[in-house]
Image: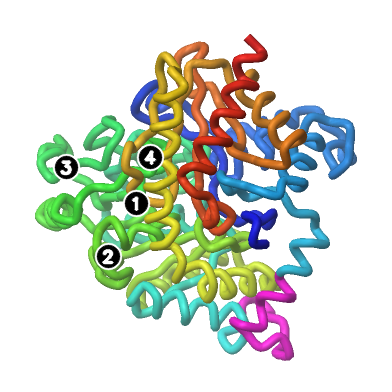
Amino acid sequence: MDESGGTRQQGHGGGAGAGSGGGAGIRQPDAHGAEVDGRVDGAGTGVAGRSGTAGRSGGSTERGRLLAAWHGSERVLADGPTGETVRERLSRLVAEAPAAYDLDDWTDVYGNDDGVVGELERRTAEALGTEDAAFFPTGTMAQQVALRCWAGRTGSTTVAGHSMSHMEVHERDAYAVVGGLRMVHPTSEPRLPTAAEVYDLQEPFGTLALELPLRDAGFVLPEWAELTGVVQAARDRDAVVHFDGARLWECTAHFGRALPEIAAQADSVYVSYYKSLDGISGAALAGSEDFVEEARAWRHRYGGQLFQQWPAALAALAGLERELPRLPEYVAHAKVVAGALRDGLGEAGVPWFRVYPEVPHTHQFQIWLPHPAGILNEAGLRQAEETRTTLFRKWFEAGPPGVAMTEVTVASSAAHWTAQDVRTALSDFLLRVGGQR
């Protein structure tokens, strides 16, 4: 990142999800921006029928225009997973990885314990305070393996989870189609379930799955006492607890607890390496030593025993070294950014808007505006092209017609944005929106 706000993009979720404030539960692009049926790519643009060469940097497609605008921006507020060429990402990996791992060591072979993947697993377990952790190529695979293991151990194929959870909305019903499991919902409200709702479930279940934070509801978290109460309710019903903690890394500030204390509430924890830590890809499943050993067996059966995974592992180690300590700073600055956006929208007289949560629980939050997504996306694209400032990324019509939502991820690229910087760029953006009406 340079001192002007930076053009380097972090690997955080940049798609959109449904949330309170309109359209809760609508299927939206996942953390890559890829919708469950594959119709949206990493830049949030349609890819059906796109040729293999279309959309490259400098190309004539809409995606090429969008990526070029993001790449050329000198100031970036809302971070996202795209905006670098392959050469730039490789160069950055070579520059950043030596601080986290010896590049003169050998590449891994099937994730051997004494190589880079094994080192990543050990450091992940240490960070989470668990006995062990296993590297997975995707979070979807890690989640399904966790639920499969617990179904065998508890003797129950029923999982209690949220209707807006990643497993329900973004994984093509893999828990049911592949794992043969079924899900019951303690609540469909845009928040985590309460202890009372877990106690009141009308049928037994073997696993309670909690997504922390609940992304599609606005990256929301419960209070610490509420979380421990829900966990105790599951224990009282003879169930185990699994955390979908893809973004668990940034929850420490909200809970006021260290990662090991948070992870200790669950019997198993899934974490992502790219949603908060700027990794290339990959995830981990953490827990007791015997549970992780069983997970490794299922990982092989699910096709996750890849021959070499060192690039993803190196990027993850670099993220643990560089990004993990900075996440509390990002969370604190997200509150400043959200407040400035809320004030700026109010001062501009926008007839209806919502910044949700008003005080973000993590370094990510939603913005809802009363305009079609196409108008907002064109305004943002023109702002990036003409002023080299990227304020927002992609907008999606996630609720009623004429209302669009975007997600804002506040990370290193936003570190130098003051509240006044945010309001000034927002005013310019809104002028461009009004010019299209």
- The amino acid type of the residue labelled 3 equals Thr
Q: Is residue 281 above or below residue 407?
A: below
Q: Type of residue at label 2? A: Ile
Circles 2 and 1, Cβ within 8 Å, touching? The answer is yes
Question: In terms of secondary structure, where does tag 4 sit?
Answer: helix
Earlier in the chain: of badge 3 and badge 4, it is 3
Tell me, yes or no, whether the two marked residues, 3 and 2, touch with CB atoms within 8 Å: no
User: Which structural element holds mark 3?
Assistant: loop
Read off the residue under disc 2. 262
SS class, disc 1: loop
Q: Position of residue 266 (x, y in %)?
A: 27, 63
Residue 310, quarter of the rendered image: bottom right
Q: CA distance from mark 4 to mark 1?
A: 23 Å
Asked if residue 211 lies left or right of residue 166, the reply is left
Which of these two is toward me, 183 or 329?
329
The residue to which callout 3 is attached is 194
Quickly name the residue at label 4: 339
Cα gap from disc 2 to disc 1, whole angstroms: 10 Å
**Residue 338 horizontal/vertical position (percent):** 41, 41
Image check: 125 left or right of 429? left
Residue 212: mark: 1
Q: Secondary structure at mark 2?
A: helix
Q: Is residue 104 magenta?
A: yes
Q: What's the magenta region? A: 93-111
User: Which residue is pictured at 70% across the width and 49% down the height?
Assistant: 74
Which of discs 2 and 4 lies nearer the camera? The answer is: 4
Q: In this rendering, is residue 40 above or below 23?
A: below
Instruction: Give the residue type at disc 1.
Output: Leu
Residue 313 painted magenta: no
